[in-house]
Amino acid sequence: MSSHAHSTPVRPRRKLRLDDIQIVDTSMLKRALRGTVVGNTMEWYDVGVYGYLAVTMGAVFLPTAAASVQVLFSLGVFAATYIARPLGGIVFGRLGDRIGRQKVLATTLIMMASATFVVGLIPSYAAIGPVAPVILVVMKLLQGFSTGGEYAGVTTFVSEYAPDRRRGFFGGFLDLGSYLGFAFGALIVSIMQLTLGNQAMLDYGWRIPFLLAGPIGAIAVYFRLKIEESPAFQAMMDSVEAVEGPAPQTGILSILRTQWKPLLIAIVLVAMANTVGYALTSYMPTYLTDTLGYDPIHGTLLTIPVLVVMAAGIPVAGLLSDRIGRRPTIWIGAATMGVFAIPAFLLLAVGAVWSTFAGLFLMAIPTALLVGPLASALPALYPTSMRYGSMGISYNIAVAVFGGTAPVFIEAIMQGTGDPMTPAYYLIGFAVVGAAAAFGLRESARRPLPGSMPAVETPAEAIELVETQDENELLDLEELPLEPIAAA
């Protein structure tokens, strides 16, 4: 006899009621956005400063080595930051799913800002010898560890705060903050280089952008401490307390066992987006200086306007994903990445200012289209009870293996082959793999997060949702946490 014969029939769930629906508090949403965006800006300010000082940092911390070794050391230290990220993602992700998003996000930001500030205080190689680069590596590892909990947390947090219909748009502001932070870091470095000159930068000027992380970090922490816990996490904890049951399992083994498929999809999608993102940001100053022969100042200045325009485009891409869906937006981004990669690097190779701008803008378009929807698409892959932890694992593994290491991989391959088109081929490969992975992505645009009730902006929206729940294609009542109708 079939085992299905004795299976317990599934009881129908009750209908969605008006008091089930979360009406988003706009003022709280804005405060949450401010508190998360400033942290992301802080994180990427450091990435920008270090990326644009890569050549200088190599000369400061390995002054006796060959120029090519200095560059590889500096990019290698940058990559080391990303090796620590998965561990931070696991540790802070588990904490975020157990004690709450807000507390963990305040902690990660304090650690991140402090480590950046300390980099500016490290004694020179001339003063303490090989201990100096060792301290630099330790501080960068600490930054990586704290940052591992940062992006996973802020995307989880904003997704749980935002209304379903505009989650992509609001999520896009996180990465707008990221790239503006990067551009701000680049601008500070440029001002230092223009006013101090090369020798002064080597002597002491490189410290100033890192030391600025102290006051910037203090402001960011102030904003972050003002935000309250996300409604979805609070609702989950309230329901656990109401039934006096055990807290949901959120450990790494539980996540790997139950979420392995969405984890793999997320890793590939993040790898694709971050490969082009880091090629444009962290690697491009080195490429423009070492391969195309620009002096460091012009190599930096040329990328700043591109970053600012691209940052403005990221919420637009998020908004597009709210309208046409996350998957179609990602496919468009992958297609432009594959098509534009070779023309972009051919334009860069011309060496003129106009062609360099044009090449950088061609890379910026797919970056915005890919990064824009991910802040809302990825958290929607996971249930509330393990969302932070799952994001911490998937995002940080992808960034560690494929994002932060992209600059050093591309530079090493290019030095080995002597082919300046290597980065273009690298990007095309990721575009193809990422586009394929998007087929497995759960379409989440304008839909409630898994395990959460619908979130809307106005009472009128809530009324309409209740009235149209039976024919609403964006609402699956079976997936909502509605208790079954009691048996007669």
Image (cartoon, helix red, strand yellow):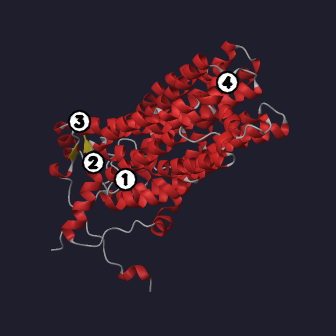
Q: Earlier in the sequence, mark 3 or mark 2?
A: 3
- How far is mark 1 from mark 2, CA to CA? 25 Å
Which residue has dot 2 on it?
454
Q: Mark 1 points at which residue?
A: 104
For label 3, the SS is: helix
Residue 204 in view? yes
Above or below, comparing residue 440 to residue 311 in the picture: below
The N terminus lies in quadrant: bottom left
Which amino acid type corresponds to the residue marked 4 in the rendered image?
Gln
Identify the amino acid type marked 3.
Thr
> Mark 3 or mark 1, which is nearer the start of the sequence?
3
Label 4 Cα neighbours within 10 Å, binned few <14 / some 14-19 / many ≥20: few
Give the Cα separation between the discs numbered 2 and 4: 58 Å
Q: In this view, does 393 lie to the left or right of 15?
A: right
Callout 2 amino acid? Pro
Give how far apart the Cα atoms at labels 4 and 3 are.
50 Å
